[in-house]
C-alpha cells in the first residue's frame, strides 16, 4: 500500500488537496471518501478507514473540501452544494487519471453529501454512509447558540472542534434545501448504512430513517460501541472489512 499526495481543481478553479491510498493488489476498484463536517482528509476516520481499505484491495481518494485542511478557498464562502461540487471534481479526477470510481463513502455530513451527489456520478455501484444525518441541516445543532446571530447579522464566528470558522446565512439557507430522504428514491446503487447506537452527535434514528426510505439492495451495519468520530482502530478495521465484502458483491465490471 502506498500513499501519495494529489491535487485537482473543482469547477470554480479552486485547488483541492487529497491523498491517494493505492493498494498493492493492483486492483481497478477506486473509492472516494468524504470527510465529516469541518474535518479533513486527515481525520481519524478518513485516514484509518482509507488505509484499511487499501490493504484489502480498494484504492481510496480522501480529500479536503474547499476551505478546509490543505485545500484552497474560503470556508465562509462554501456550503453543502459546494461539497457536492467538490465530490464531482474528485470523481472526474479519478476518472481521468485512473478509473472511474465505483465506491462512494461519506462520514457524518459527508454521508449526506454522497447521497446528494449520486445523481451526478453515474458509475457508482456502492454507497456507504457512516454516522450520516437524514437531513443536512442536522449539523446546526453544533452551533445552536449562534443561529440567531447568523440570521440577524448574516454571519457569526463559531468554534467547532477547536477551529474558529465563519458560518454565514447562505450556508444555513443552502442546508435547508437538502435532506437525504428526498434522494433515496432515485438511488440505484447498493447502499450500506453504518451507524453506532451510541452515537451522541448524530442519533441512530437518522440511520433508521435512511434505511426505511432506501430501496434494496441495502444493509445496516451496527457499529456497536463506536463513537461518532470512529476514534478506535478496531471500528475502522470492521468498517473496512464490511465495506470490502459489500463492494465485492455489488461492484460491477470495471472498464
Image (tube, helix red, strand yellow):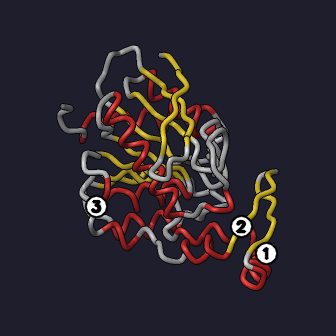
* Lower position in the chain sequence, tag 3 or tag 1: 1
For residue 221, say whether it is visible. Answer: no
Q: For residue 169, which numbered disc appears in the image?
A: none
Kindly indicate whether the residue at mark 1 contacts the one at mark 2 (C-beta within 8 angstroms): yes
Name the quadrant containing residue 142: bottom right
**What residue is pinned by disc 2?**
167
Mark 1 and mark 3 in contact (Cβ < 8 Å)?
no
In the picture of the structure, the residue carrying the numbered disc 3 is 187
Dot 2 lies on which element? strand
Which x, y percent locates residue 251?
24, 38
Q: Residue at x 61, y 74 (%)?
A: 170
Q: Earlier in the sequence, mark 2 or mark 1?
A: 1
Q: Nearer the viewer, residue 77 or 55?
A: 77
Q: Secondary structure at mark 3?
A: loop
Query: How far is mark 3 from mark 2, CA to CA?
Result: 30 Å
Front residue of 143/209: it is 143
How far is mark 3 from mark 1, CA to CA?
Answer: 35 Å
Q: Is residue 5 left or right of residue 165?
A: left
Q: Determine the residue positioned at 60% across, 70% down.
A: 138
Q: Which mark lies nearer to you, 3 or 2?
A: 2
Q: Is residue 200 left or right of residue 31?
A: right
Question: What residue is rendered at 18% in x and 31% in y?
Answer: 255
Q: From the top left corner, tell me how far across and down residue 149 is, in percent.
A: 79, 80
Foreground pick, 90 / 106: 90
Q: Are marks 3 and 2 in contact (CB under 8 Å)?
A: no
- The residue identified by callout 1 is 146
Under tag 1, what secondary structure?
Answer: helix
Which residue appears farthest toward the front when viewing the image?
13
Left or right of 105 in this view: 28: left
- 16 relative to 133, above or below: above
Could you tell which of marks 3 and 2 lies nearer the N-terminus? 2
Amino acid at each position: 500500500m502506498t500513499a501519495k499526495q494529489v491535487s485537482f481543481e473543482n469547477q470554480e478553479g479552486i485547488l483541492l488537496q487529497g491523498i491517494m491510498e493505492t493498494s498493492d493488489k493492483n486492483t481497478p476498484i477506486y473509492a472516494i471518501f468524504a470527510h465529516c463536517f469541518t474535518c479533513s482528509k486527515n481525520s481519524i476516520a478518513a485516514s484509518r478507514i482509507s488505509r484499511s481499505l487499501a490493504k484489502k484491495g480498494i484504492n481510496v481518494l480522501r480529500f479536503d473540501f474547499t476551505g478546509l485542511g490543505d485545500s484552497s478557498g474560503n470556508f465562509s464562502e462554501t456550503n453543502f452544494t459546494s461539497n457536492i461540487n467538490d465530490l464531482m471534481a474528485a470523481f472526474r479526477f479519478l476518472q481521468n487519471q485512473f478509473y472511474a470510481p465505483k465506491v462512494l463513502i461519506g462520514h457524518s455530513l459527508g454521508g449526506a453529501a454522497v447521497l446528494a451527489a449520486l445523481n451526478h456520478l453515474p458509475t457508482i455501484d456502492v454507497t456507504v454512509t457512516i454516522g450520516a444525518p437524514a437531513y443536512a441541516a442536522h449539523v446546526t445543532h453544533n452551533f445552536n447558540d449562534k443561529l440567531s446571530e447568523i440570521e440577524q447579522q448574516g454571519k457569526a464566528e463559531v468554534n467547532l472542534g477547536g477551529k474558529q470558522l465563519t458560518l454565514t446565512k447562505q450556508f444555513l439557507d443552502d442546508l435547508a434545501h437538502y435532506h437525504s430522504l428526498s434522494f433515496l428514491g432515485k438511488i440505484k446503487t447498493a447502499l450500506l448504512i453504518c451507524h453506532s447506537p451510541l452515537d451522541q452527535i448524530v442519533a441512530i434514528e437518522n440511520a433508521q430513517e435512511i434505511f426505511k426510505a432506501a430501496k434494496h439492495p441495502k444493509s445496516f451495519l451496527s457499529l456497536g460501541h463506536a463513537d461518532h468520530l470512529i476514534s478506535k482502530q478496531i471500528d475502522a478495521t470492521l468498517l473496512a472489512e464490511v465495506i470490502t465484502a459489500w463492494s465485492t458483491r455489488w461492484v460491477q465490471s470495471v472498464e
